[in-house]
Structure formats: C-alpha cells, structure tokens
Image (cartoon, helix red, strand yellow):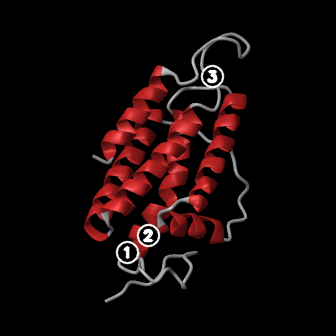
Amino acid sequence: MPSQPARGRPSSGPARGFASFSPEEWELLVRLPGQVVIAATSAEADGARRTVAEGLAGLDAIAAGRASANLLVREVVATIYAENDDAQPAAEEFADRAAGLAAVLMSCHRAAGLLADRGTDRDRLAYQAWLQSIAERVCGAAPSGGLLGIGGSQVSMAEAQFLDDLSRAFA
C-alpha cells in the first residue's frame, strides 16, 4: 500500500514515484541535509563569524542539489524548499558536539540502509555524494586556526575526521 506524502512533500512527485517511502522515512531524507550542515559546523569549535560563513555555505550547497542529475536528490531539495517554515535561518552548532555528531552519523547510516532497500544504487550514491559535498563545502568555508583569519588550515583535523566518518556512515 503506498504511503502518504510527508509534510511539505510535493504530491505530484516524479513518475518514478517516491511513494515507497513512509512519511517518516521521507522526513529523514529531507531533514538530513540540514542536520549535516549543523554537524559540519559543529565538528570544530568556532567563533560566530566562522560559524555563519559555514552555515551560509551549507545553505548554498543544499540549494545546489536542485541541479543534480539524480531525481531523488532534486525531489528532496524541492521538498525542502516547498516547506512553509517561517523560521529564520540561523548559524547553529550542537550544544553537545559528540552526541550531535553521533546522531547525525547514525541518521546517515539509516538513510543509506533505507536507500539501499527502497531506492536504487544511483539514488544512494547520488544522495551520499550530495551530503558529502554539503559537508565539504561547510568544512572548507572558513579557515581554522591562525591569527585574525591569517594562516591556519582550510579544513581542520576535526573537520577532516567528520568528513571521513560521514563517508563511512554510508558504507
């Protein structure tokens, strides 16, 4: 029996149909890109200016999914933008970094399993690549360390570890 579309999900989905996902499963796929942005900004303790730069890079990276060759990724992005959310975007980090990062990585693992079971390999790989590109853009948005923005590294060791962990979550 087909499931009902999740809140904000366009009811006139692609012919391929993502109706095989329950509303909860679809919600996971739609919410995960934003959670990845927060996780990537949380991977390294930063000042407010760097966190804002990272958050803006994350929003841009999510929007870039509109140009994906993969229909699932485009449908997820369309759902994100179709939601009527009056909340203003904010630069966020997890209060408890370790717990927040672990939760996002577990959600990525769940999404990978879900896509392996109900999607195609192309869907799983495209969704993973999109999430990875979001995290890479966030982590590389502003240099870490250095003095007054001079020196430091573009991607810190903690951010590089998060990127590796994210990749493994889809394995």
Q: Could you give the CA–CA distance between mark 2 and mark 3, rounded to whole angstroms?
A: 34 Å
Q: Is residue 126 left or right of residue 170?
A: right
Vertical order, 68 against 23 (above or below): above
Residue found at x 37% / y 51%: 108
Q: Nearer the viewer, residue 56 or 88?
A: 56
Quadrant of residue 10 within the rendered picture: bottom right
Amino acid type, callout 3: Pro
- Residue at the farthest bottom position: 1
Q: Quadrant of the N terminus?
A: bottom left
Amino acid type assigned to the residue bearing label 2 in the image: Trp
- Tag 3–tag 1 contact (CB < 8 Å): no
Q: Is residue 67 above or below residue 158?
A: below
Badges 2 and 3: C-beta atoms under 8 Å apart?
no
Measuring 38% from the left and 53% from the top, which residue is drawn there?
107
How far apart are the two marked residues, 1 and 2, measured between alpha carbons?
Answer: 6 Å
On screen, 41 above or below 79?
A: above
The residue at which mark 3 appears reads as 143
Is 42 located above or below residue 38 in the figure? Answer: above
Q: Residue at x 48, y 68 (%)?
A: 71
Q: Which residue is mark 1?
A: 21
Asked which secondary structure carries label 2, the reply is helix
Where does label 2 land, which residue? 26
Q: Earlier in the sequence, mark 2 or mark 3?
A: 2
Count numbered badges in the picture: 3
